[in-house]
Amino acid sequence: MAMLQVNFYSKAMRREVTFNALIPLDTMEMPGREKDVQQPMRALYLLNGYTGSHTDWISFTRIRELSDKHRIAVFMPAGENHFYVDDEDKGALYGEYVGNEIVTYTRELFPISHRKEDTFIGGLSMGGYGAIRNGLKYAENFSKIIALSSALITYKAQNADTDFNDGIADYNYFRRVFGDLTKLEGSDKDPEALIKRVKDAKVEIPAIYMACGTEDFLLDVNHKYRDYLNAEQIDFIYIEGPGEHSWAFWDEYIEKAITWAVE
């Protein structure tokens, strides 16, 4: 197992960026046994939550163990509290970075598969939203989406009043991230609208795995998106279990989700 920190110049972000990588190349060779022929690895692009960083998944979960067990390369970029959407005014295209650029870059740098069928995107909370948004926007790159305790705050932010505050952030923050909130619904930042766009483009919609704790404060918006996916007859799995918005829940369900993804 190789664990690396990679720094490179991102054209999408217009600056040097950092991501962590887990590359399970090592295999034990037994005397007298033929050496295993290694195939290109599957890849998971795993996004952190609000206030987190590219170190979170390694620090707080068993992702290193899971990467090794399932022989899947895991790449962990940073969302920097920007919900993995593009900021054209600032010239920081977070969506393009995690949905397209890093996929191309890591395919050139590491022995991973170039096939959509072997390429997944996932995340928790803000990263769960980012995985849904960019997994759909760049559906040609990903076959599966893992979304844990997804912060689908677009339901609450669209058309929000100037005094809006959900206890975590306020109107000014959401307007800075998502732009004109009166134009959020139906845009490429709206997970419902993205389903329709992918359908209209006749691109295969990635399979979706959603999980949320029954005590999670984001349960209502996860229910809303679950109901929408059901109405649109989308291929997805939705699971609820005891738990809050916590690493204990995410550590448990990232294992379940990766097992689902590699089956």
Image (cartoon, rainbow, N blue to C red):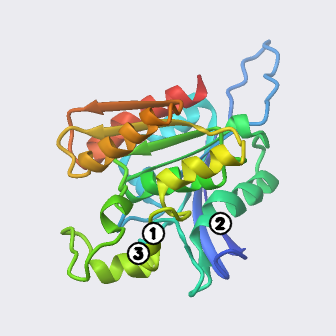
Q: Quadrant of the N terminus?
A: top right
Asked whether residue 13 appears in the rendered view, the answer is: yes
Name above or below for residue 90 compared with residue 117.
below
Q: Quadrant of the C terminus?
A: top right
Q: Amino acid at mark 1?
A: Leu
Q: Quadrant of residue 228?
A: top left
Asked whether residue 75 appears in the rendered view, the answer is: no
Residue at the spot 65% in from the left edge and 78% down from the top edge: 16
Q: Which mark is residue 184?
A: 1
Q: Which mark is residue 143?
A: none
Left or right: 85 in relation to 53 = right
Residue pointed to by mark 2: 96
Residue pointed to by mark 3: 182
Residue at the spot 65% in from the left edge and 82% down from the top edge: 15
Q: Quadrant of residue 169?
A: bottom left
| Nearest-to-viewer mark from 3 and 2 | 3
Crowd class of label 3 (few under 14; some 14 to 19; many from 20; radius 10 Å): few
- N-terminal of the two: label 1 or label 2? 2
Q: Amino acid at mark 2?
A: Glu
Q: Amino acid at mark 3?
A: Thr
What secondary structure is marked by label 3?
helix
Residue 43, percent across and down?
Answer: 65, 42
Q: Nearer the viewer, residue 183 or 260?
A: 183
- N-terminal of the two: label 3 or label 2? 2
Residue at the spot 38% in from the left edge and 62% down from the top edge: 154
